[in-house]
Image: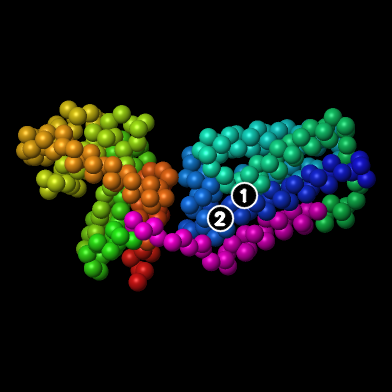
C-alpha cells in the first residue's frame, strides 16, 4: 500500500486540478462568470496578460498538461517516467510563477490556487517516481477506469457551466448614481480611461465606431484614472477635462488617445490644433478644480471596484480589460436590450 500511495496521490491531485481547471475554463470563455465572481481574485487573474497567451485561455494549457501527466502516470517504463517528470516540472514551475503573480497582486484566485498547488505536488511526486523507478499497477481495467474518471473531471464542470446561471453582482452605488443622472431612454456608457495606457488606446479604437453607430441611444461619460506609471497621463487627463469644458470633448479625447506627445506642451499643441483659446486652456489646466475632478473620478473608479484599465460600464454591465470589437459589440448590444 505504501509503495502505491504516490501513484494514487498523483491521480487524486490530477482529478482535483482538472476539475478546478475546467471550472476556470468555463469562466474564461463565457461572457459572464458562473463559478467565480469577477470582483475577486478569479476576475483579477483573468484580466492579466497571462490569461490568454497566444489568444488561448490559460486553463486550456492546464487541462492539457495535467491530463497528459495523469495518462503518463498510467504508463509503465522509463520513457514514460522521464516524460512525466519533465512535463510535471514545467507545470510546477509555471504554477509557482502564478502563485507569485497572485502574491504580487495581493489577491487570491481560489480555483487557480487549487490548480497551482496540485501542480506543485504532482511535480514532486513525478520526480519521486523517476528516482524510484516506480511503475503503475499492471491492470488495463484500472487504467480505463482512471481515464474515465479523469475525463469526467473535465466534462462534468464544463457541462454544469453550460446550464448554470451567471453570477450577478450588485451594481456599485456610485455607478447607480451615474445611471440615475443619464438622460431618460439612453444607455449610460462610462469610460474609465488613462490616455497613456496602451490597452485603453487599443480599446478606444475598437469602441469608438460602435458608439458612433449607436449615438442616438448612448450617453457617454468619460472618467479619468491616470496611472502613476504613466508620466504624462495626468497631463492628458487635465487636457481632456479642459477640452470637455470648452466643447471639444470627443475631438480632444480622440487626439489624446492617438498622440505621441502627451507632455504639457504636447497637450497644449493639441488644444491649439483644435482651435481652442490657448490662454483659457492654460488657465483651465492649472486650475485646482481640474485636479479635483481627476481625484473625484479616480475615487469613483475605486468605489466601483475598479482593478485595471480600461474599464467600462455599459449600463449595469461591467467590461474590463482590452476587448476586440466583436466582444464590445456583443456587450453593448446586450446592455441596450436590457429593460
Circle number at residue 111:
1
x and y percentages locating residue 173 in the rendered image: 36, 59
Residue in view at x 12 percent, y 34 percent: 282
Q: Can residue 52 be seen in the rendering of this structure?
A: no
Residue 131 vs 68, above or below: the answer is above
In this picture, residue 72 sits left or right of residue 335: right
Question: Crowding near pointer 1: few (<14 within 10 Å), some, many (20+)?
Answer: many
Question: What secondary structure predominates along the stretch shown in magenta?
Answer: helix
Tell me the colour scheme of the image.
rainbow
x and y percentages locating residue 34 in the rendered image: 54, 60
Q: Are marks 2 and 1 in contact (CB under 8 Å)?
A: yes
Instruction: Name the residue nearer the viewer: 235 or 76.
Output: 235
x and y percentages locating residue 99 in the rendered image: 60, 37
In this picture, residue 272 sits left or right of residue 70: left
Residue in view at x 83 percent, y 47 percent: 8
For numbered disc 2, what is the local secondary structure?
A: loop
Q: Residue furthest right?
A: 1
x and y percentages locating residue 42 in the rendered image: 54, 49
Residue at numbered disc 2: 36
Name which quarter of the figure residue 27 lies in.
bottom right
Instruction: Name the residue nearer the viewer: 47 or 62.
Output: 47
Instruction: Name the residue nearer the viewer: 180 or 60.
Output: 180
Residue in view at x 79 percent, y 44 percent: 10
Q: Is residue 156 rendered magenta in the image?
A: yes
Magenta range is 146-175
Quadrant of the frame with the N terminus: top right
Name which quarter of the figure residue 145 lies in.
bottom right
Amino acid at each position: 500500500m505504501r509503495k502505491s500511495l504516490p501513484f494514487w496521490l498523483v491521480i487524486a491531485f490530477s482529478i482535483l486540478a482538472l476539475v478546478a481547471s475546467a471550472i476556470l475554463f468555463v469562466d474564461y470563455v463565457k461572457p459572464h462568470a458562473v463559478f467565480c465572481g469577477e470582483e475577486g481574485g478569479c476576475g483579477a487573474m483573468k484580466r492579466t496578460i497571462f490569461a490568454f497567451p497566444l489568444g488561448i485561455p490559460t486553463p486550456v494549457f492546464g487541462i492539457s498538461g495535467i491530463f497528459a501527466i495523469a495518462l503518463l502516470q498510467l504508463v509503465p517504463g522509463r520513457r514514460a517516467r522521464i516524460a512525466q517528470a519533465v512535463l510535471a516540472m514545467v507545470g510546477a514551475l509555471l504554477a509557482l510563477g502564478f502563485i507569485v503573480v497572485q502574491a504580487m497582486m495581493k489577491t487570491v484566485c481560489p480555483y487557480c490556487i487549487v490548480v497551482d498547488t496540485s501542480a506543485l505536488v504532482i511535480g514532486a511526486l513525478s520526480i519521486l517516481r523517476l528516482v524510484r523507478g516506480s511503475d503503475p499497477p499492471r491492470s488495463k481495467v484500472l487504467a480505463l477506469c482512471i481515464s474515465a474518471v479523469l475525463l469526467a473531471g473535465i466534462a462534468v464542470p464544463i457541462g454544469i457551466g453550460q446550464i448554470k446561471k451567471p453570477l450577478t453582482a450588485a451594481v456599485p452605488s456610485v455607478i447607480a448614481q451615474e445611471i440615475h443622472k443619464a438622460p431618460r431612454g439612453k444607455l449610460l456608457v462610462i469610460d474609465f480611461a488613462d490616455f497613456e495606457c496602451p490597452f485603453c488606446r487599443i480599446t478606444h479604437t475598437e469602441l469608438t465606431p460602435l458608439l458612433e453607430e449607436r449615438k442616438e441611444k448612448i450617453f457617454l461619460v468619460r472618467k479619468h484614472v491616470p496611472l502613476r506609471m504613466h508620466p504624462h497621463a495626468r497631463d492628458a487627463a487635465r487636457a481632456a477635462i479642459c477640452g470637455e469644458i470648452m466643447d471639444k470633448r470627443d475631438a480632444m479625447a480622440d487626439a489624446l488617445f492617438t498622440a505621441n506627445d502627451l507632455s504639457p506642451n504636447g497637450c497644449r499643441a493639441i488644444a491649439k490644433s483644435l482651435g481652442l483659446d490657448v490662454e483659457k486652456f492654460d488657465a483651465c489646466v492649472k486650475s485646482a478644480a481640474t485636479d479635483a475632478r481627476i481625484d473625484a473620478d479616480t475615487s469613483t473608479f475605486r468605489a466601483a471596484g475598479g482593478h485595471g484599465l480600461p474599464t467600462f460600464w455599459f449600463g449595469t454591465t461591467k467590461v474590463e480589460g482590452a476587448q476586440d470589437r466583436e466582444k464590445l459589440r456583443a456587450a453593448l448590444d446586450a446592455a441596450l436590450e436590457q429593460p
